[in-house]
Image (cartoon, rainbow, N blue to C red):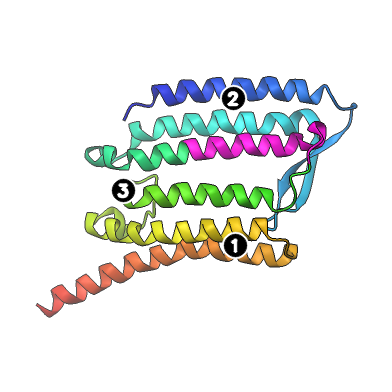
């Protein structure tokens, strides 16, 4: 898997984000604070001084980009690396896109924007849609996908599990977008988002065990 173009793009993007942070921080009075964290309902629950707040997504973009770039070199299943490459790229690009959006949300008060409490939930939902679309096309790997002992050691188990995971991630993404767009109480939005995310992650993991256990019993009967 070639990571150099993505890594160079990530470095350039992080530099642009840092430049934007320096400019935006200069537009607010000294000591001003900006939102840096949103709960599962999409509501602001933490703030930081403007410059560190705006630089944080740029730093995360660079750090995560370096991490994604290292993964192919340390993947134990090198013979199956290309099979997981599309999911790795989607995770990499989706994460970068989400961090750019987060920086925009942080800068929203400076830019005169009011994204609303559901906006960040909508973006997370879009990321779930991207990942859900790529999951059925992936193959066993130690760093991306539904990584259980049963999927990593059995390609058929991985494929079946990720077909289910893809459908669940798509459903979870659509649900998140819906609850992000609908005006509902923050507590209810939080419950629905967490439920969708946990269901999309935990149900495939349990299904991978079920497939392994069913196969084991079948072999024992024979």
The mark found on residue 137 in the picture is 3
Residue drawn at x 54%, y 48% is 126
Task: Return the residue nearer the eye: 107 or 211.
Answer: 107
Residue drawn at x 16%, y 75% is 218
Query: For numbered disc 1, what is the local secondary structure?
Result: helix
Q: Are marks 1 and 3 in contact (CB under 8 Å)?
A: no
Neighbourhood count class around disc 2 (C-alpha, 10 Å): few under 14, some 14–19, many 20 upward: many
Q: Is residue 100 magenta?
A: yes
Front: mark 3 or 2: 3
Residue drawn at x 45%, y 41% is 91
From this view, report whether residue 145 is shown above or below residue 204: above
Q: Which residues are magenta?
A: 93-113
Residue 128 in picture, x, y percent from top left: 50, 51
The residue to which callout 1 is attached is: 194
The residue to which callout 2 is attached is: 14
Front: mark 1 or 3: 3
């Amino acid at each position: 898997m070639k990571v150099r173009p993505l890594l160079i793009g990530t470095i350039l993007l992080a530099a642009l984000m840092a430049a934007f942070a320096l400019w935006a921080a200069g537009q607010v009075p000294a000591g001003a604070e900006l939102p840096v964290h949103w709960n599962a309902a999409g509501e602001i629950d933490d703030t930081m001084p403007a410059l560190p707040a705006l630089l944080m997504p740029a730093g995360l973009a660079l750090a995560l980009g370096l991490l994604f770039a290292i993964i192919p070199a340390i993947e134990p299943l090198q013979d199956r690396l290309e099979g997981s490459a599309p999911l790795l790229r989607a995770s990499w690009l989706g994460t970068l896109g989400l961090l750019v959006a987060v920086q925009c949300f942080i800068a929203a008060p400076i830019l005169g924007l009011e994204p609303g409490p559901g906006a960040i939930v909508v973006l997370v939902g879009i990321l779930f849609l991207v990942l859900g679309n790529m999951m059925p096309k992936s193959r066993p790997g130690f760093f991306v996908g539904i990584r259980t002992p049963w999927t990593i050691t059995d390609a058929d188990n991985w494929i079946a599990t990720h077909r289910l995971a893809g459908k669940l991630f798509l459903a979870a993404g659509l649900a998140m977008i819906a609850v992000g767009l609908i005006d509902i109480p923050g507590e209810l939005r939080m419950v629905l988002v967490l439920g969708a995310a946990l269901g999309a992650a935990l149900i495939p993991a349990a299904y991978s065990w079920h497939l392994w256990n069913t196969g084991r019993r079948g072999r024992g009967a024979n």
